[in-house]
Amino acid sequence: RIRGVRAAAAAAAAGRGHAPEPAAPAGAAALSPQEALKREAAEAAVERHVRSGMVVGLGTGSTARHMVACIGRKLAAGALRDVTGVPTSESTAAQARGLQSPLASLATHARLDVCIDGADAVDARLNLVKGGGGALLREKMVARCAAKFVVITDASKTCDALGPSFALPVEVTPFCWEHTMRQIGQMDSLRGAEAAPRLRKKEAGGDDKYTTDNGNYIVD
């Protein structure tokens, strides 16, 4: 159910399937090389996996933003029709609404055709670390309701093994979060590990706790 789309596949996807991708708006800021790769991967995923009439899970993060923008452009140009998005975060919902893309939730659309999202780290076996953007709970709930889950990344997210390149996020309830964090640190799978669980803050070195859209905390 997990499909990976590499940025290099974008060129091969061009010109196939439905109408071509509309050009970016005039005056748009030039993208960095890494952002350009993210956009290519996102556009390749939309080209290959999104069709008119689908219900699509809309991921969260810097790569997923390009996917949401691509769907919005295609809807505006008429290259896609009747695509309903189920967003995985308030930020994604706000972006989609700004593009006038139709939205729904799992309350009314519990079966999705596809969910497209990014990842923070991907190993050679397509194991993933997700949730660096703080939307991991909603991302997982939406992905589980999709018939197909497509992961879009650029080459900077690939790694030999999960762990060293990106800490594993865990969303925890504020109630007794200190106890929960201790329990996480005492898991058998972490015995002997040098890294200790830490509570995510809004800003590095700050005191304010990072809070998810669900009002929870994140332990990394």
Image (tube, grey):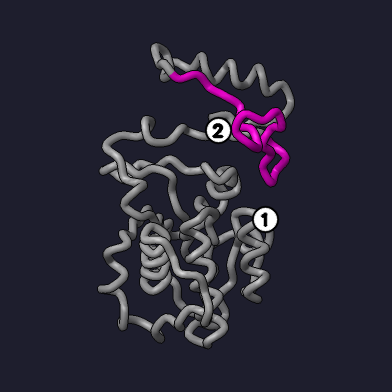
Taking the spot 35% from the left edge, 34% from the top edge, the residue there is 162
Q: Residues within 10 Å of mark 2 (few under 14, many from 20)?
A: many
**Residue 75, quarter of picture:** bottom right
In the image, residue 199 lies in the stretch drawn in magenta: yes
Q: Which residue is mark 2?
A: 170
Q: Residue at x 31, y 59 (%)?
A: 6
Q: Where is residue 74 drawn, in percent x and y?
A: 50, 80
Report whether 156 appears left or right of 208.
left
Element marked by disc 1? helix
The residue at the point 48 percent across, 17 percent down is 187
Q: Earlier in the sequence, mark 2 or mark 1?
A: 1
Residues shaded magenta: 195-216
Q: Which quadrant would residue 39 be assigned to in this image? A: bottom left
How far apart are labels 2 and 1 at the CA level?
A: 19 Å
For the N terminus, the image quarter is bottom left
Quick check: 211 above or below 42? above
Q: Which residue is mark 1?
A: 90
Chief secondary structure of the magenta portion: loop
- The front one of 137 and 26 is 26
Q: Where residue 90 sits in the image (x, y, percent)?
A: 67, 55
